[in-house]
Image (cartoon, rainbow, N blue to C red):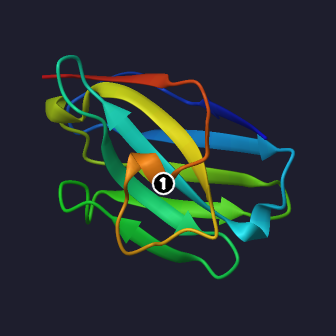
Amino acid sequence: VQLQASGGGLVQAGGSLRLSCATSGFTFDDYVIGWFRQAPGKVREGVSCIRTRDGITYYADSVKGRFTISSDNAKNTVYLQMNSLKPEDTALHYCAADFDGSVWFMKAYEYDSWGQGTQVTVSS
């Protein structure tokens, strides 16, 4: 199982970024793919996830209305479109896979496999 996150960068407040999570080595439709983030000195938090077989999604309250998660099942890739970025969105962002997981909440310990992080930095 492999997950490769990309798309992070430095952006001004109010700007946008699109993160990608390319996956391989497992049956994509059997998994929930989630995005987590961790800022220095803070706990890892769930941002958004998607159940790839039917497109059901979950968003943390802090990103609702600003972020959109989607999946391209032909490419086994999940995207996180981040708009109206705020300095508090600055963090290392990770994608992870949860076999037959829930989309009603996000708990890091439920996720079986993790990609490396991609840094998102939002300047004020």
Residue 85 vertical position relative to residue 97 in the rendered view, above or below = above
Residue lying at 53% horizontally and 50% vertically, measured from the top left: 111
* Residue 14 drawn at (x, y percent): 22, 39
Residue 108 vertical position relative to residue 8 in the rendered view, above or below = below
Q: Residue furthest front?
A: 109
> In this figure, which residue is indicated by the disc labeled 1?
110
Residue lying at 33% horizontally and 64% vertically, measured from the top left: 59
Residue 2 vertical position relative to residue 119 in the rendered view, above or below = below
Residue lying at 39% horizontally and 69% vertically, measured from the top left: 58
* Residue 107 drawn at (x, y percent): 37, 54
User: Is residue 107 toward the left or the right of residue 100 in the image?
Assistant: left
Along the line of sight, which residue is nearer the eye, 109 or 75? 109
Q: Considering the numbered disc 1 on the image, is that residue within a helix, a strand or a loop?
A: helix
Residue lying at 85% horizontally and 62% vertically, measured from the top left: 74
Along the line of sight, which residue is nearer the eye, 111 or 74? 111
* Residue 9 drawn at (x, y percent): 44, 21
Along the line of sight, which residue is nearer the eye, 6 or 13? 6
User: Is residue 104 toward the left or the right of residue 35 in the image?
Assistant: left
The amino acid marked with disc number 1 is Glu
Q: Quadrant of residue 113?
A: top right
**How many C-alpha atoms fall within 10 Å of the one at disc 1: few (<14), some, or many (≥20)?**
few
| Screen quadrant of the N terminus | top right
The mark total stands at: 1
